Amino acid sequence: MPQIKEPWFTTFFIIMLVALLGGVSGGIWLLIRHPDANTGETNSDRPLAQSATSDLPNSSRNNQDDSSRGDKSKAPGKFSSFADVDGVPTGLFKYGGSTTWVPLRQKETPSINAFWPDFQLLYVLPVSGNPGSGTGIKMLLEGRLDFSQSSRPLKLEEYEEAKRRGFNLEQIPVAIDDISFVVNPDLDISGLTIDDLKGIYTGKIVNWSEVNGPDVPIVPFSRSPLVGGTPEFFIEQVLGNEELGSAVEVVDNTTQGLSEVAANLGGIYYASSPEVVPQCTTKPIPIARSSEEPFVPPYKEPFISPDACPGQRNQLNIEATKKGEYPLTRRLFVIVKKDGGLAQQAGLAYARLILTDQGQQLVQDAGFVSIR
């Protein structure tokens, strides 16, 4: 019986069908094995807790916004001027928080509003109590603010509270700040170490004679750590999370703290350097990390006596901060509510504006150190 030959197109069709099926199955295997083509991670390579920890305070993801993971041209700090920033929303947006930000707020808010008049910014005070980093974050969590300003990092419990409310928080550092200590202008004291400060504010050192000063009782003043990021930072970094001593007198704000020190020969108070170094009623003092290290003044030398103020004022020792010589330095943060809505858009836009070259110049004009 003669053999029947298959037409050539039938053979070609079978070969193409086999190739197609092989490509599809291979593609499915790659999708399963390599779900993230951008990172090269596999399911077995990716940490199981990554999604749970991506918004924790120590995660590197907290210091960048979502856009920095995609279009790099939109990452914070990539722009020269306010005009270069995109994604700036229209509307009235409420913000609040840290009193440390006052010198910067006074410069950047009018500048931003002048360039982006439809991006209206309104600083909101708390209904009760005093403003501060902790208060601002609480107001943000409760939906009373669109974003907030903080002089301390977010706490774990604040991240967790946000998640309970159905959104995440992100902290974006935008400036560097110092903590300065001021005393009465007539008090003869050359400087204090970190251990001296800890002893004073925990009640172990009660007289200035114990730290090479005159025989005068020490009267320490502080804002409440329940609302202020500065006292929280101080308690963590200087006191090692010990409580303030019973002799510490709590004041509502820096204006009151300065007034108390000016009226009391033994008084001492601490606050953000731009708030206290240039003022006329008290005297900022040098501090040292230890007795073996030199005292570093928070002001440019030579020191300008309060008697010469306001004609002349002490200027911030920016170089010491940049070189890492000043002992108490921290970062200032914009706290963003990552809810996928206008609040998130406003917070990210605000951070991007401050991180432009133009915004960082305002940071320096306000007495802080550029973070870039």
Image: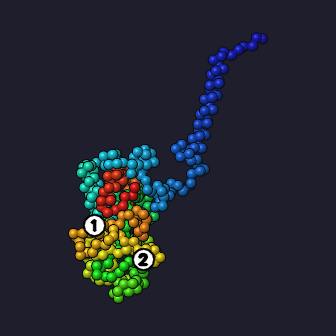
In the rendered view, tell whether residue 67 sits above or below residue 101: above
Q: Between residues 344 and 306, which one lies in front from this camera angle?
A: 306
- All told, the count of numbered labels is 2
Labelled pair 2, 1 in contact (Cβ < 8 Å): no
Q: Which mark is residue 127?
A: 1
* Location of residue 73 in the rendering, given as x and y in whole percent from the top left corner: 40, 45
Q: Amino acid at mark 1?
A: Val
Which picture quadrant has residue 160?
bottom left
* Location of residue 146 in the rendering, given as x and y in whole percent from the top left corner: 33, 56
**Which residue sits furthest top?**
2
Q: Residue at x 52, y 44 (%)?
A: 38
**Which residue sits furthest left?**
311
Q: Between residues 108 and 303, which one lies in front from this camera angle?
A: 303
Identify the residue under disc 2: 193
Q: Between residues 153 and 103, which one lies in front from this camera angle?
A: 103
Which picture quadrant has residue 123?
bottom left
Q: Amino acid at mark 2?
A: Thr
Question: Element type at marker 2?
Answer: strand
* Location of residue 102 in the rendering, given as x and y in whole percent from the top left corner: 29, 64
Question: Element type at marker 1?
Answer: loop
Q: Residue at x 36, y 64 (%)?
A: 318
Q: Residue at x 27, y 52 (%)?
A: 112
- Report if residue 226 is visible in the image: no
Q: Between residues 90 and 127, which one lies in front from this camera angle?
A: 90
- Graded by Cα atoms within 10 Å as few (under 14), some (14 to 19) or many (20 or more), the crowding at tag 2 reads many
In the rendered view, tell whether residue 126 sits above or below residue 286: above
- What is the spatial separation of the Cα atoms under label 2 and label 1, in whole angstroms? 39 Å
Quarter containing the C terminus: bottom left
- Report if residue 188 is visible in the image: yes
